Amino acid sequence: MSSQPDRIILPQNVSPLHYKLQLEPYFDTFKFDGTVSIDLKVNDKESDFVELNTFELDIHEAKINDVKSLETVTDEENQTSRFKFPAGTLKDSDNVTIDIKFTGILNDTMAGFYRAKYIDNATGETKYMATTQMEPTDARRAFPCFDEPNLKASFEITLVSDPKLTHLSNMDVKKEEIFDGKKFTYFNPTPKMSTYLVAFIVAELEYVECKDFRIPVRVYATPGSEHLGQYAANLTAKTLSFFEKAFGIEYPLPKMDSVAVHEFSAGAMENWGLVTYRVVDLLLDEKNASLERIKRVAEVVQHELAHQWFGNLVTMDWWEGLWLNEGFATWMSWYACNQFQPEWKVWEQYVADDLQSALGLDSLRSSHPIEVPVKRADEINQIFDHISYAKGSSLLRMISQWLGEDVFVKGVSQYLNKFKFGNAKTEDLWDALSEASGKDVRNVMDIWTKKVGFPIVSVTEDGHKITFKQNRYLNTADVKPEEDKTLYPVFLSLKTNSGVDHSLTLDERELTVTVEDVDFIKTNANQAGIYVTSYSDDRWTTLSKQSDLLTVEDRTGLVADCKTLSLSGYTSTKNFLQLISQWKNEDSFVVWEQMINSLGSLKAAWAFEPKETLEALDEFTRQLVSEKTHSLGWEFSENESYASQRLKVEMFSSSAAAKDPVVVKAALKMFEKYTSGDSNAIPPLIKSSVFGTVARDGNAKNYEKLFAIYKNPSSSDEKLSALRCLGRFEDPALMKRTLGYLFDGTVLNQDIYIPMGGMRGHKEGIKTLWAWTKENWDALHKKFPPSLTMLGSILTVATSGFTSRQAIDEIEDFFKDKSTKGFDQSLAQTLDTITSKANWVDRDREVVVKFLKEHNYYK
Ligand SMILES: [Zn+2]
């Protein structure tokens, strides 16, 4: 390892040019044999060693031009091996080749070259795929390599196995031959690329194809489910051609394969030319899928394809640029969606989804700046979070609205052209955008990317004089002066009766302006900026009556802001309850989704309050949603608009969750018919909500039925819905049973957080889940090594349901003498989340009770 002041990296005496890699996985011993020859450029001829990254590899031999290495020093902690050669080995040439023979573990931790388990539907046999997940730093588990994103090289890969298995890699096949009863597949060399994008698969696979693009576009799956890949194949072809036009650069590889992988830790991975997916994020039965599922598949496919240019062709120089990779792919995915499916209104939904998750995490003290210094490679997994993806893309959305989407995409295209097949820094993109737009992008972006958090803008009015003041926002509302020094460049985008004033930027602490007509004012038009706005009580009341003057994004943003401000005490929770109770006639499914979600946050914070209060909150919800639900009904027709379908789904599920008796009865009846053999009894769009209602109803016989559906589902979508709902049963014996399935192989490792998530939805579940987690912590830690992101997610699901300070003490106590490496950030964020809920309930407990009593919601 060598140390630059800000990064720990490999020594630079040599650098890689070309890898020749051959691998043969064994499905009986779960090991693989490998040889790698790496052509190296010698930068320091006086040096006599080669050091590269290795992890859990058994090295048999290393040679340079037939000269064997004298010794190998493996550093487990830094995941490196240093091969020492006789003095003078590197002296005489500019290039040398190192040959290494090794054996690795075909592991079951979803990292490196690993085995993904599945059941063959035809035979019931347990089988395995050998597949890879290298990002961020697990290529070193698969072969010795220079595992840093800016050490790009070309790769020539050979796979060896039983001839009946399919071999795939980033490139197309150069030659295939059978030798000694084994199949050898030689792939063409890749262009220059980073190690984290290398991929290879050895498995039983079939494919479907779309021929609408100039190169082969295929979707692979284990036999029997490949037909479900047609939607993604068609979308892939269409998206590739759209991105080629948008970026003005041809997709550079000779084929594009997508593969559904049975055990997968993330949603998907953008390996160049060989994108791997979690099954549910790729395969789809279009007729029987929910709208969210179809949208999710589109989102993921388009996200991974955006990376083929942004990330793969041009790569971040080092891991602190990760956010730009992810933020951009997220933005670009919605940009494409909005072109292909304008009726989905994805940018409106963005305000309710991505923007809120960004603000949610960034309002915690334990948040981090978008661009964090990453010194060690193993710190990287913790920044694959909502800050990188959601705040990163929110920032790009803000900038794209400031510059105009076309100008933004033009700037991106210039950046991609300039750095293709190479690496770039964040600033390089800002410079390209400045050039394309003539605006000082770098200056604005620097503050937003390098500083943590976002501001609250307080609006105070004195007649026609309006003062805007910014401060750092925290959910815990206990900002210290030293945390409140950043002045963000805030685009105020003030909306009044005469339109939107885009000229106002608040980059000082305070700004006072005079406004002619103050009948209607709202900042942050269309919720393009990353901040929350606090108004006076009177202004909240006025705004709640002006919904006709507000766009969907505005209304969504107001609901979300008002809830956020209630949570932190900047406004009373009464204002929030009043605001949403005024909007019973709302027609947009996006605004409804936000109202229901925000109310859901309130209920989650109140989860441990007395039963009568929770029942009164349910009554409040019923009175809010029932009328609309009953007038819309829950029958769907094929030619109905997307918006109308989504609205019905939203209303039905919120009524069901609030125990509307008519809806609950209907749901139970549909389930009864469905499980008696009428496969059309439940409209697919509300199936998960029907399952949820059944689980909340608690009948143990229905647990058996849901479990049977999980074991033998009609689609992977249905399987996950059933799995989630197994966690919703409140009966202690059933909870115990569900938890038992997490470790006995019934639930795949990749899915264990799903039933856990169901359990977090109720008080008894929250307690039981935490008790189980404590008891099984060692096993969890072993199953999900801290270098993966999953351990942090599991910890969050297992603890974040709590709402009291006492729970915080317990959690802290449990971890006080344990290593929290790899999930310390998740832990800190969870504790902050619980603190803010505890503060909220303590502050507004009486306010909520009073409101509910005054409006007769108590029985
Ligand atoms: Zn991504």
Image (tube, rainbow, N blue to C red):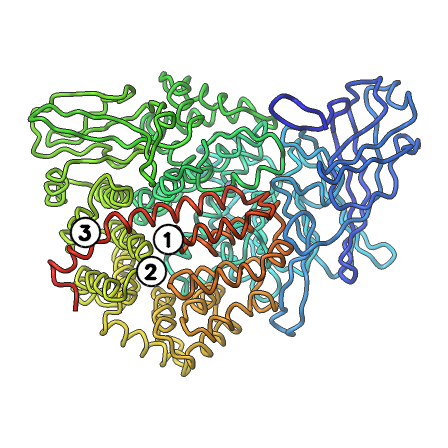
Residue 701, percent from left and from top: 42, 81
Look at the picture and state if 485 lies above or below 212.
Answer: above
Does any portion of residue 541 appear in the rendered image?
A: yes
Kindly indicate whether the residue at mark 2 contacts the one at mark 1 (C-beta within 8 angstroms).
Answer: yes
Q: What is the secondary structure assignment of the residue under circle 2? A: loop
Residue 568, percent from left and from top: 29, 42
Q: Residues within 10 Å of mark 3 (few under 14, many from 20)?
A: some
If you read the primary sequence from the N terminus, does the residue marked by circle 3 or circle 1 appear first? 1
The residue lying toward the viewer, choosing from 852 and 789, is: 852
Q: What is the secondary structure assignment of the residue under circle 3? A: helix
Residue 242 tag number: none
The residue lying toward the viewer, choosing from 254 and 118, is: 118
If you read the primary sequence from the N terminus, does the residue marked by circle 1 or circle 2 appear first? 2
Q: Is residue 80 left or right of residue 701?
A: right
- Residue bearing the label numbered 2: 608
Q: Residues within 10 Å of mark 1 (few under 14, many from 20)?
A: some
- Residue bearing the label numbered 3: 847
For the residues marked 3 and 1, what is the alpha-carbon distance in whole angstroms?
18 Å
Amino acid type, residue under disc 2 in the picture: Phe
Tell me which corner region of the image, top left, top right, bottom left or bottom right, holds residue 505: top left
Q: Residue at x 71, y 39 (%)?
A: 77
Q: Residue at x 10, y 41 (%)?
A: 542
Amino acid type, residue under disc 3 in the picture: Val
Does any portion of residue 758 appear in the rendered image?
A: no
